[in-house]
Structures are given as structure tokens and as C-alpha cells.
Image (cartoon, rainbow, N blue to C red):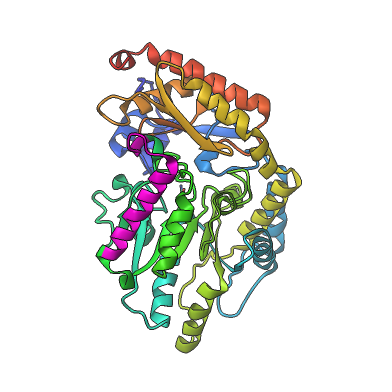
Amino acid sequence: MSQSKTIAPNSIEARDIAYQFHPSVDLRRYEEEGGLIIDRGEGIYVFDQAGKRYIEGLAGLWSVAVGFNEKRLADVAYAQMQKLPYYHSFNYKAHGPSVDLAEKLVQISPEHLTKVHFTSSGSEANDLVVKMIWYRSNALGLPDKKKIIGRVKGYHGVTIAAGSVTGIPANHGSFDLPLDRMIHTLTPDYPRDHLEGETEEQFSARMAEALEELILREGPETIAAMFGEPVMGAGGVIVPPKGYWEAIQAVLRKYDILLVADEVICGFGRTGKMFACEVYGIKPDVMVTSKQISSSYMPLSAILMSDDFYNPIADESHRLGVFAHGYTASGHPVATAVGLENIKIIEERDLVGNAARLEAQFLSGLRGLESHPMALWSRGVGLIGALEIKGTAKVGEMGQLAQACLLEEGLIVRAIGDAICLCPPLVITAEQVDEMIAAIGRALDALAETDLARSVL
Ligand code: PMP
């Protein structure tokens, strides 16, 4: 995996190592090995400096719906930069692009979501939702109703509050997280965790019972909200089993607990519907979107909410004289203009339909790989999926090696634990899905030849 490569002095690799503190790496390992410098993109592919082509099997960070060289987004950004490159939304000001995008989001999202607040990242959005929930509980005269439920392996970002709702130990370790108002319930990972003979529905009922037990243990009057990704992404692509969201929502309704659907990965077509809430019958009080909202060409996120969520907050801001929260870049005109154009492209090219149409081929391709000696089981929905492979006692060791083999084969993916996770750009074609599946097959063959793999075969 850690191929020794020579890094020429003053090369971009050397300067990167010298000057840049990277996110989400082992910094000491980075000093030794550096990173793969990606130079340009085209459709579902990216190219490194030497011109080697890779399928971007994770769409960057689960985010580039329209592919890596969409000129319309560049043109819209350029035009907006020339007309009004920056303006803010504070102090009773507004500008066209954020209004247009807010209107569009309300039109395409579930009917009961009626107001939009813009931020720039998924973490910022979720962090602010936590603040809004606390503000709202205070407004309602419920100062004790503040705890937030997340899920083990749930991912909602890395800022202090969002990172606390996140249920991934690596995001907590040494950061002094989670905050003590954040508690976590079970991961609905049916293939891994179901009991012998337990159906998906029975498993879902057990997950709902565990949630109810947690609520009763903590005191229902202390719990304000639960956050959940309709399909868990960074926790390893965990697809909810049958009946899961129905059972969970029934418990939340019983105890008057809000539901925040984190659609940061799922939103804008990933699961074959515009929003995954439609796939799973989720009726959230708040829906958080980012990533594919602008195909990540510009940093952008949007919080959509119901009237019932919004009104107490609006009243409280009136009582205090101001909703004293906002960012310099909230509703940035270039980001929101790019976001609107990106959604128009998703609609015009029917990329949501493309995900729905390719789902069967994509998932059966993954299922076909299950017979490989290195593979265990696969899972997915729409154009997001994962293949679990045989690991060693050290979780993630084989996944990392598989990731390196896949890179050799020209496919960039994310190994999470020992799962190869896939989330290609929504512009992918049927031929390219086959190309991606074939590359995984070849990479698994190469993996099977390694000493580490031989130890588990
Ligand atoms: N929520 C989910 C579901 C995510 O997948 C992510 C990012 N992977 C985030 C929130 C955080 O978004 P960001 O990285 O833009 O802060």
C-alpha cells in the first residue's frame, strides 16, 4: 500500500508536504508518503499529473453529481462574479441568487418544508441546526429539552456540535467530543448485526425499541431531536432495513422529538429520488442538504424546515430583536447561483431518473462480486453502494490495501472499515457502471494475490 515513491525536491508533492496540513489523514504518514495530486477532471473521471485517468467512484466526497467539467457551472459563476461577486444576507439585505435558490429548494423538496437558511458546509449546517433546536426549545419555554440523539456510525460533520452528533469514534478521539448533550443510539446495520433468523422488520422493531429505551433512560422531556442520514454514508454506506424509518418515526412522534434528516449525501438524486426522504417515507422537521446541491463546485449547504420548526424561532428572534447568528458567506451569491444552475442541470438531464434506471445494474454488479473469494456481502440503493470484503483482525487493514489495488486499476473509492464504498457522479452511464464493476473485480484479483489476503483466504 505504502509504495515508496521518490518525491523530487520542489515538486508539487514536496511543496504540498512542506506547507499543507491536510484534513483527514495521518499527518506523519503524509509527511512520508505525500498524496496523489489530481490535476483535472472530465465527466466521471479525474486525471493525475502524469495523465493517468481514474474513475472518481466516490464523486469526490460523495458530491459531484454533474461530473468534473460542467461548463455551465463555470459560466454561471463567472457571470455572477462580474455582476455581484459578493453580498451578504445580514441586516435586512438580500440578493437575487439566494432568493432564486431558496424558492427552487422549497418547490422541489417535500411539501411541508417551507423555509431555507443557507450555510457553506454540511458541518456548518448541522451545527446551526443544533443551535436552532436549542434556541427553539428556549423559545417554547422548554429549557431542559436540549439533548440530541445521533447514531453510532452516523456522520453529520466535524464542528463541535455536529461532530458531537456524529457517532464515529475517530471523529471524537482527542478532540474532547462528544459534548454531553449528545447521545447515540444503534446503527441499523442489518447484514452485520441481525440475530439468527431475525427478519429486516424484526430488526427494525428492535432498533426502535433500543431508541425508546434510550429516550426513557434519559427522560423524554430532556430530548429535543434526533439526527439521521436516510442512508448512512461515512459510517460505511448503511442502508436502512425494511420498516426502519417508519418504526423510528413512530417512537419520535410518541415523545415529541424532532427529526432532522441529514440529506447531505442523499439529496439531489443519489438514491433515485430527488430526496431519500421520499424513498423511505421520512417526514422530517428539518432537512439538511449540501454536496450535490452545487456538485461541490462552490461551498454551499441549505437547511430546509417546516413552519412548525421555524415559527418559535422567528418569535424568539422578534422578542430578542435579532436572530444573532450568521456567516459572512451565508447565501453567498456565487455559490447560490451555481447551486441553482446545478439543480437545473440535474433536472434537465434527468440525473435523478438516471440513478433510478441504473440502480438495478449497479446493485447487481455489486452482488455479482459477492462470489469473489475476497468478498462478503454488498448493499446499496440508487447509485450509492458498498462491497464488504474479508478483513483481518485489524479492521480497515484489508480495506486500505483494497483501496490501493483499486487505485492501481484506475478507480478511486473510499474504503471504510473493510467496505469498498461507491458513490459515482450521477452522470455515469451504463457502460461506465460496467467499467467500474470490472475494475473492482480486477482489483480484488490483485488483492487476493497479496500476502495479507492469503492470510485470510
Ligand atoms: N452530513 C453528512 C451526511 C455528510 O456525509 C457530511 C460530509 N461527508 C457532512 C454532514 C459534513 O459536511 P461537510 O464536510 O461539508 O462539513
Residue shown at 50%/15% (left/top)? 442
* Farthest top residue in view: 449
Q: Position of residue 311 (x, y in %)?
A: 53, 79
Q: Is residue 176 left or right of residue 287?
A: left
**Vertical side of 401 occupied by 44: above or below:** below
Residue 124 in view in this figure = no
Residue 268 in view in this figure = yes
Q: Nearer the viewer, residue 274 or 48?
A: 274
Write the start and end of the magenta stretch as one range: 192-216
Q: Nearer the viewer, residue 47 or 350?
A: 350
The C terminus, quarter of image: top left
Q: Position of residue 389 (x, y in %)?
A: 39, 25
Instruction: Answer whether residue 51 is magenta in the image.
Output: no
Q: Is residue 335 left or right of residue 263?
A: right
Residue shown at 67%/68% (left/top)? 99
Q: Position of residue 267 (x, y in %)?
A: 57, 51
Residue 395 sits in quarter: top left
Residue shown at 35%/63% (left/top)? 148
Residue shown at 67%/58% (left/top)? 108
**Vertical side of 376 occupied by 202: above or below:** below
The dominant secondary structure in magenta is helix
Q: Position of residue 144 (x, y in %)?
A: 31, 76
* Farthest right residue in view: 348
Residue 418 sits in quarter: top left
The N terminus, quarter of image: top left
